[in-house]
Amino acid sequence: MEQAKTHNSLDKESMIEWANQELGSEINYEEIKNTDTSIVLEGIYEGDSVYLKSANQAAFFESHLTAYLSKNFPNTTVELLAVNHKSNWIVMKKLPGVLLRTTKSMKAYELMIRNYTILQRQVMPNVNAVLSLGVIDRRLPILWKEIDDNLELLCATGLDEEDTLKILSIKSELLSMCEEMVGVFPDTLEHGDLHSGNVFIEDNSFRFFDWGDASITHPFLSIRVFWNSLFELLEEDTDENWMRKISEFRPAYLAMWKDYAPIKYVKKTIVIG
């Protein structure tokens, strides 16, 4: 599979020209996001918003994965109007509903994690197909080797010296955690950035987008980012209240996996994850 161009080589005029050719319309786009990882432009097509996105080399598979999910698991992600895999460009319809984070609803957040788990379980038999798209392979034996060989380099991507030393001091514990998690739960798709700003809700249906950080790994590794979104439901933003909120949510998540192992083991594995 040919990988996408680097983000630095991105030519917005070429993106727009391509998108307009694909849609057969002269659309004026406005830039709404421009980071070192992606660019998103918004335009009006047939009376509604459409979004033109390009992701950088680190997420060279994003157009492939988004197209795969849109085709094989409809109504779980964005609906595409055009795809350019060579350049990693996609044109998306406006998602129906609202961002999950605007709801401030415990019920909505709980339904979201249930729907996400359903998607993960649906993808499980198709892991090899997803890996063939170029999605990053972080299955636990590979993750174990990454930690064993490159933990200091991984820390150097964003941690200061103090935090790096803390992480390096628990290297053996991290390796043991990987070993403990192997074997019971099948590997599946992990979003990589499952916060409430990457999910739309409409009538208790959920669509997940922005798949550039995705990987194939243990399903429970998604939950750690989601827990952070629970701060948004707190009246008073404290760690104690946050942990209490996690405790309220955990049973709903546990219930989605109880057919794989006894609840006691599921609880332990979620904590490790």
Image (cartoon, rainbow, N blue to C red):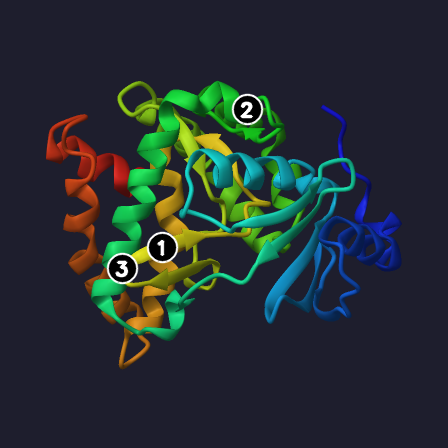
Label 2 environment density (alpha carbons within 10 Å; few <14, some 14–19, many ≥20):
some
> In the rendered structure, which amino acid carries the disc numbered 2?
Leu
Distance from the alpha carbon under mark 3 to that under mark 1: 7 Å
Up-down: is 59 above or below 33? above
User: What's the residue at 45%, 33% (across, down)?
Assistant: 72
Q: Quadrant of residue 265?
A: top left
Label 3 environment density (alpha carbons within 10 Å; few <14, some 14–19, many ≥20):
few
Mark 1 and mark 3 in contact (Cβ < 8 Å)?
yes
User: What's the residue at 30%, 68% (across, down)?
Assistant: 239
Q: Is residue 183 left or right of residue 93?
A: left
Report the quarter where the C terminus lies: top left
Query: Label 1, on which residue?
Result: 206
- Residue 79: x percent and y percent? 52, 50
Residue 130 in view of the camera: yes
Mark 3 and mark 2 in contact (Cβ < 8 Å)?
no
Q: Quadrant of residue 17?
A: bottom right
Residue 273 in view of the camera: no
> In the rendered structure, which amino acid carries the disc numbered 3?
Asn
Query: Label 3, on which residue?
Result: 204
- Residue 94: x percent and y percent? 54, 63
Label 1 environment density (alpha carbons within 10 Å; few <14, some 14–19, many ≥20):
many
- Residue 221: x percent and y percent? 39, 40
Query: Label 2, on which residue?
Result: 131
Q: Is residue 271 left or right of residue 263?
A: right
Question: Counting residues from the N terminus, which is met first, the one under dot 2 or under dot 3?
Answer: 2
User: What's the residue at 62%, 28% (across, down)?
Assistant: 134
